[in-house]
Amino acid sequence: MRALTSRDKHSLFKGHALFGHLAPVDIDALLSHARLEQHQAGRTVFIKGSPARSMMAVVAGSIKISATAQGGREVVLAIINAGEIFGEIALLDGGARTADATAISDCELLVIDRREFIPFLERRSDLCLALLRLLCQRLRQTDDQIEAALFERLDTRLARVLLRLAKSCFGASPSPPMQLNVSQHELAGMVGATRERVNKQLHAWQRDGLVDLGKRLIVIRDATAIEALS
C-alpha cells in the first residue's frame, strides 16, 4: 500500500464544498491520523444501519451509494469518484449510516475517524457554516431527484444524470468524448427506471451518434445534444 504525500492529501480536498477553503496547515492537522484503505471491486464499504465512525475520500476508483427500495429494487443515490468525499454527514451525529456504499472498481480510500474530525470541527465555526451549506445543497439535490422521478421524461432524467457524472469526473466544463465507467443497472437506479428502459434509450442515442456503449462503459460523443435534452 503506497503512502500519500502531503500534496496528494491536499489535492483530494481542493475545490470540495466542505474542505476546499482550508489552509494547507489545517488539512495537515485534520489528516495527521488518517489511514489509507483498499477495497476490491464489488466489496461493501459500509451498509445502511452500520455505525458511522469515519468519513472517506476517494483516492482512486469509484464508490456507489445506494439503498434498497420496496420490492428489492436498488436505488442509486450517487456515484462518488476520485477526489470526492462521502460519509461525512452521518459522521457528524455518530448515528447509523443511511445508505450502502459499494466499490464499483478497485478503490483506495483515505479514511478519517470521527474522534479526529469532531474536535477539529468544534474549533472551526467557518467549517460549520460550510457544512450547513453542503447539507442544504444535498437536500435540494434529493428533492430535485424525487421530483424528476415523479414528473420528468426518462430521456430528460437520463441526460441530466450523465451530465452530472461527466462533471464529477471531468470538471465543470467537460469536453467530449467523455468516458463514464457506469453500468446501465446503476444508471437505472439513479433515474428511477428499469434497466430495460434505460438500455432502449441509450441504444436510441447510440444510433443518433450521441453516445457509444460498452461493457460498464458509456462514452458521451455529443455533449451539446445531451445537454439540450436535460
Image (cartoon, helix red, strand yellow):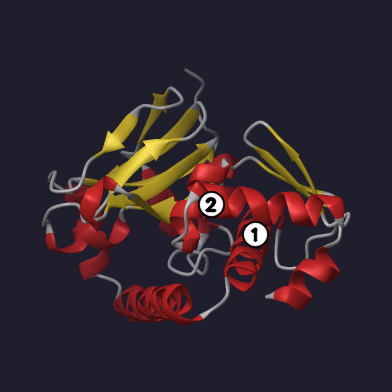
Crowd tier of the residue under label 2, counting other residues whose Cα lies within 10 Å: few below 14, some 14–19, many 20 or above: many
Picture residue at 34% right of the left edge, 75% below the top: 135
Q: On residue 214, which mark appears?
A: none
Residue bearing the label numbered 1: 162
Picture residue at 47% right of the left edge, 31% below the top: 108
Residue 156 shown left or right of residue 4 in the figure: right
Q: Quadrant of residue 92?
A: bottom left
Tell me which label, 1 or 2, sits earlier in the chain.
Answer: 1
Residue 156 shown left or right of residue 179 in the figure: left
| Residue 224 percent location from the top left of the image | 84, 70
Picture residue at 19% right of the left edge, 47% below the top: 48
| Residue 79 percent location from the top left of the image | 49, 51
Task: Kindly report which numbered mark, 1 or 2, lies closer to the viewer in this rendering.
Answer: 2
| Residue 178 percent location from the top left of the image | 78, 50
Task: Say which of 43 and 191 sits in front.
Answer: 191
Is the residue under label 2 in contact with that under label 1 (CB below 8 Å)?
Answer: yes
> In the rendered structure, which amino acid carries the disc numbered 1?
Leu
Residue 84 visible somewhere in the drawing: no
> In the rendered structure, which amino acid carries the disc numbered 2?
Leu
- Helix, strand or loop at disc 2? helix
Residue 223 shown left or right of residue 123 in the figure: right
| Number of disc labels | 2
* Residue 128 position (above or below residue 107): below
Real-space Cα separation, disc 1 to disc 2, in angstroms: 8 Å
Task: Say which of 111 and 162 sits in front.
Answer: 162
Task: Say which of 163 and 184 sits in front.
Answer: 184
Residue 199 visible somewhere in the drawing: yes
Which image quadrant: the C terminus? bottom right
Q: Quadrant of residue 93?
A: bottom left
- Helix, strand or loop at disc 1? helix
Residue bearing the label numbered 2: 187
